[in-house]
Image (tube, grey):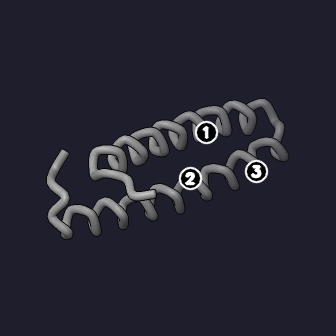
């Protein structure tokens, strides 16, 4: 499945917003003394970081292939 540049940018926006949400929730659990849940949320945030980097590489590749700016 090939995504357009616009779709890739939408994916990046979604993943970035999810990362912000996970970080905020992680802070709440950490502040409440629930280190186990905070640690699990940290793992999720790390995975989201990786996915964001992957989408950024796909965006760069699509842009360099002249798929147009969206």
**Residue 37, percent from left and from top:** 80, 42
Which residue is pictured at 28% across the width and 52% down the height? 5
Q: x, y percentage for residue 67?
A: 19, 59
Nearest to N terminus: mark 1 or mark 3: 1
Quarter holding residue 56? bottom left
Quadrant holding the C terminus: top left
Instruction: Give the residue drawn at x 45%, y 39%.
Output: 14
- Residue named by callout 2: 48
Q: Give residue 39's mark.
A: 3
Q: Distance between the residues labelled 1 and 2?
A: 9 Å
Marks 1 and 3, Cα distance to the nearest angstrom? Answer: 11 Å
Decide which of 63, 2 is in the foreground and name it: 2
- Mark 2 surroundings within 10 Å by alpha-carbon count, few (fewer than 14), some (14 through 19), many (20 or more): some
SS assignment at label 3: helix
Q: Are marks 1 and 2 in contact (CB under 8 Å)?
A: yes
Residue at x-position 67% and y-position 39%: 26
Point out the frontmost of discs 1 and 3.
1
In the rendered view, does 59 fall on the left or right side of 67?
A: right
Disc 1, SS:
helix
Query: Quick one: label 1, few (<14), some, or many (20+) residues within 10 Å?
Result: some
Q: Position of residue 15 (x, y in %)?
A: 49, 44
Choose mark 1 or mark 2, whichever is in front. Answer: 2
| Left-right relation of 60 to 50 | left
The answer to which of marks 2 and 3 sits earlier in the sequence is: 3
Q: Return the residue at label 1.
A: 22
Q: Local crowd at mark 3 within 10 Å, few (<14), some, or many (≥20)?
A: some
């Amino acid at each position: 499945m090939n995504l357009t540049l616009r779709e890739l940018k939408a994916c990046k926006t979604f993943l970035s917003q999810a990362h912000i949400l996970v970080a905020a929730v992680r802070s709440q659990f950490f502040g409440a003394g629930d280190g186990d849940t905070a640690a699990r949320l940290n793992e999720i945030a790390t995975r989201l970081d990786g996915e964001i980097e992957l989408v950024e590489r796909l965006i760069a590749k699509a842009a360099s292939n002249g798929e147009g700016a969206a």
